[in-house]
Image: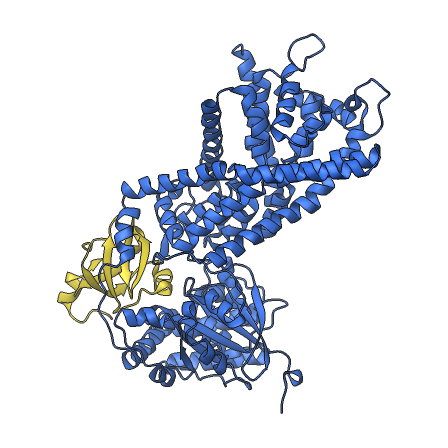
Chain colours: A yellow, B blue
Amino acid sequence: MAFTTELERDSALNLSQAAVGCEFQVKQLDGPGCKQLREIGFCEEMRVRKVSNGRNLVCAMCGTRLALSRELAEQVLVTAV
Amino acid sequence: MSTGDEHPIPKVALVGHPNVGKTTLFNQLTGERRKVGNYAGVTVEKISATIYTPHGHQMELVDLPGTYSLTPSSPDERVTRDVLLGDLDGEESPQLVISVVDASSLERHLPLTLQLIELGLPVIVALNQVDRAEAKGLRLNPQVLTDELGVPVVACQATSGKGIVQLKQALRFPLPPASERRWKGNAAVEHAIADLTKQLESQGLERPEAHALQLLGESDYRTQAQPHLSRVAQAAALDVAADLIKQNHNPEEEISALRSQTIRRAISAAAHEMGDEGETFSDKIDRVALHPIGGWTLFAAIMFAIFWSIFRFAEVPMGWVEAGVGFIKDKVGGMLPEGDLNSLLTDGIIEGVGAVVIFLPQILLLFFLIGLLEGSGYMARATFLMDRVMARVGLSGKSFLPLLSGYACAIPGVMATRSISSNKQRLLTILVLPWQSCTARLPVYAILIPLLIPSILGQTTMMFFIYFLGTGTALLVAWLLSKRIGIGEAAPHFLLELPPYRLPDFGYVFRHVIDRGLAFLKKAGSLILGIVIILWALGTYPKAPEGESQFDHSAMGCIGNFLEPVVKPLGWDARLGTATLASFAAREVFVSQVAVSFAIEEDEDDEEAFRDQIRSAIKTSEKPDGSPAYPPLVVLSVLIFYIYALQCLPTTAVVQRETKSWKWALAQLAGMSIFAYLAAFIVYQGGTFLGF
């Protein structure tokens, strides 16, 4: 499991709730879109920065900009770094 | 010394994510300028070339469609997986795979490389974009990565040709051996893999371990029918997977986690981690380009500029084509004595084909501008913005590019739908796409609109309205159909890579434009030429006695009389009926057909005068009772019919090929024709009722 402590689990939020401009670490993928997310590069422990919000939001990962729908973003659990 | 003759020519496949620079690398290796685009999924056709290693051995290099993994989510990605597993008919699996990865984004790219290694094929890793990675402060050690992955790793920068020689040297003969799988699972998983491999081997399946990993790592692959995988093999995989699940193991998740661990280990050894580089130049542009208000303003401005330039700049080369056609007609007409052969060549072939070729400049210009949008990276942003609109009607943002191409020609539009991952959304896009007003409809509009509105401003507004009507109907019908087809909850979520903005590769753009132009000319030279000859013959024979109307006597006239009762409710007569019937092969034929039916000779030097003649013939035609034969309401009814009807045989053929179904292709043809008929009917009858 990607969460090491209960505290960490409690402080996790999904990428849709996360604040724009901040950097996060992916902790867990949870939901039907998991496979699609993993394929394009969302994996546990990856660092992402949220670039913009919206119905489709944009985040930066490994220097690449990815646009994803809010439903998918809700399936990515992150913690602040 | 061994030569290539002793072996069959080895096949080398380039595999990588979309936008990784695979096609640029292909061009560098082959020395041939080919496609390179920013837009995810631009490589949808099979592209291959013969190359020679530095030692003179011949190899066939194949550029496979870009894919994020061997778990396909669109038809073009499926091609890649099936070719690699040797499961595609008529396609031998490659003997060597070049895995193209983005050095600045290894975490995202190496999972595919691991999957390729697991196929049991020899793999060479091309570590592309090393310059970009270095610019970001990332230090990579290809030798360490070679040790970690067990396959040769060559650093390169395809755009500048750096590392190409080293990559070619790595393609030496004999080919490097295949590497071992890079991870070991727990006892249960390893036992399952070994067990399934053994069963598949005894069933005579090639690459049993590769298939076993694919079957265990991807539930869809073992549950959904695969054309090249027997039910027995899938049943064996289902049993083995069920056993694992019973022991509280999830094969998909565990295999995926094992790959991730392997990659993290390799990267931490071979690369110095870096932080995010902060806001880039592309991000700055995106702050405007993706802004809810600024983004749409920019989008609208770009679309306006595209359409404005198509109508404005294409005029000049269109004039040249016109003059050229007139010149040829003059020359040919002058060389032959008056008679049927002269008439066939000049009035039939040259004029008929010329009426179509005149639109070549507009088509080329639209494809050039679309190429610039793709090449610069803006197309992905447009896709992002349009997703909001498209999602409302059941389509995806990825339907935008095909629909935009549809303004030029439905055929490349239908082909561009291959990058849409959902089959249902793809079908829906194909079904409504021909309502996008294509350039083939322009000659018809050019004749009809001035008959309705004399002022230039009014005509421009009308043209805008026609585009709006076509697109509006396409979206409305998509919305209605999406409920029937069952797109809703099942629609895949939007996920798209936004490539950095860059200067378009003009070589690629021009090549693309030339390809499209040649395809259009081929159509004009084959299908349209054939139709034009048939139409000429139907309009010329049997010959009318002196002083009588040739049209009324000809076979075409007879067909027209036969058709009249059908088209009468639309306010049309036999001439319009035959011209429309002839247009079902290709709309452009309308103009030449109307001209032939009024026996109007084309003025070699002045196309506009020719159009004026047609217009005045339409205007002054009278019914036997002296009332005008084509009042504005009839013209409007014809216009409405052309906006809505699918009158293009090549489109129907391409839809059949892309959907692999005559049912959908013919349903689309019938559906759109009935829709057009009803729309024209409502306009004419409604207008008559209201007293117009």
Instruction: Estimate the x, y position of residue B629 in percent, counting from the top left.
Output: 65, 15
Residue occupying the far top of the picture? B625
Left-right relation of B114 to B545 = left
Q: Residue furthest left?
A: A7
Identified at 82% across, 18% down, the residue is B548
Which residue lies at the image location 45% right of the left edge and 73% below the top edge? B99
Identify the image quadrant of residue B393: top left
Q: Is residue B162 visible?
A: yes
User: Compared with residue B333, is residue B398 higher up or lower down, i.e. above or below?
Assistant: below
Q: Quadrant of the N terminus of chain B?
A: bottom right
The residue drawn where x is 61% and y is 69% is: B91
Q: Residue at x 27, y 47 (%)?
A: B288
Task: Specify whether residue B251 is in view.
Answer: no
Q: Residue B210 placed where, x, y %? A: 49, 76
Outermost right residue: B545
To which quarter of the image does residue B184 belong?
Answer: bottom left
In this picture, residue B93 sits left or right of residue B459 = right
Q: Position of residue B166 (x, y in %)?
A: 45, 80
Q: Quadrant of the C terminus of chain B?
A: top right
